[in-house]
Amino acid sequence: MGALDGKVALVTGAGSGLGRACAQIFAREGAAVAVADIRPEGGEETVQLIRDAGRRGQLRRR
């Protein structure tokens, strides 16, 4: 059981760097992660990494 099971996390700037790392950690700890970034391609990559790890992630568009 993860520390964030049943929670939802919204991570801005999640398309790369620290934001991406935070999104992946939140997902690993059990949160469903809403990924936001001004670069949709980076956000999509992050969501794919989360899903490839068997977790829940979704790209939020403005």
Image (cartoon, rainbow, N blue to C red):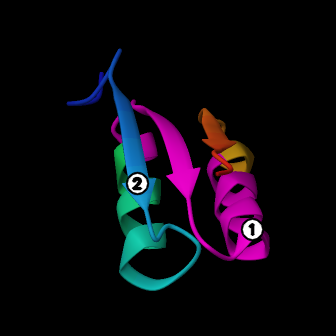
Q: Position of residue 33 (x, y in %)?
A: 49, 40
What residue is shown at x 57% (from left), y 67% (from top)? 37
Residue ID for mark 1: 40
Q: Does residue 16 lie above or below 14 as drawn?
A: below
Towards the viewer: 49 or 57: 57
In the image, residue 39 lies in the stretch drawn in magenta? yes
Name of the residue lying farthest toward the left:
3
Amino acid type, callout 2: Val
What residue would you read off at disc 2? 11
Chain part drawn in magenta: 27-50
Label tally: 2
Q: Which residue is at the far front?
A: 62
Q: Are marks 1 and 2 in contact (CB under 8 Å)?
A: no
Q: CA distance from mark 1 to mark 2?
A: 13 Å
Left or right: 5 as drawn, with respect to 28: left
Rendered view: 21 above or below 16: above
Q: Which mark is residue 15?
A: none
23 in relation to 19, above or below: above
Report whether 3 appears left or right of 30.
left
x, y percent for residue 59: 68, 47
**Position of 39 compared to 20: left or right?**
right
Give the residue displayed 66% in from the left and 37% down from the top: 54
Q: Is residue 57 above or below residue 39?
A: above
The x, y position of residue 57, in whole percent, is 62, 40
Between discs 1 and 2, the one toward the N terminus: 2
- Helix, strand, or loop for circle 2? strand
Q: What crowding class fits label 2: few (fewer than 14 Cα within 10 Å), some (14-19), or many (20 or more)?
A: many
The kind of residue on which mark 1 rests is: Pro
Q: Residue at x 61, y 73 (%)?
A: 38
Residue at point 30%, 21% (across, down): 1
Report the side of 30 relative to 37 (left or right).
left
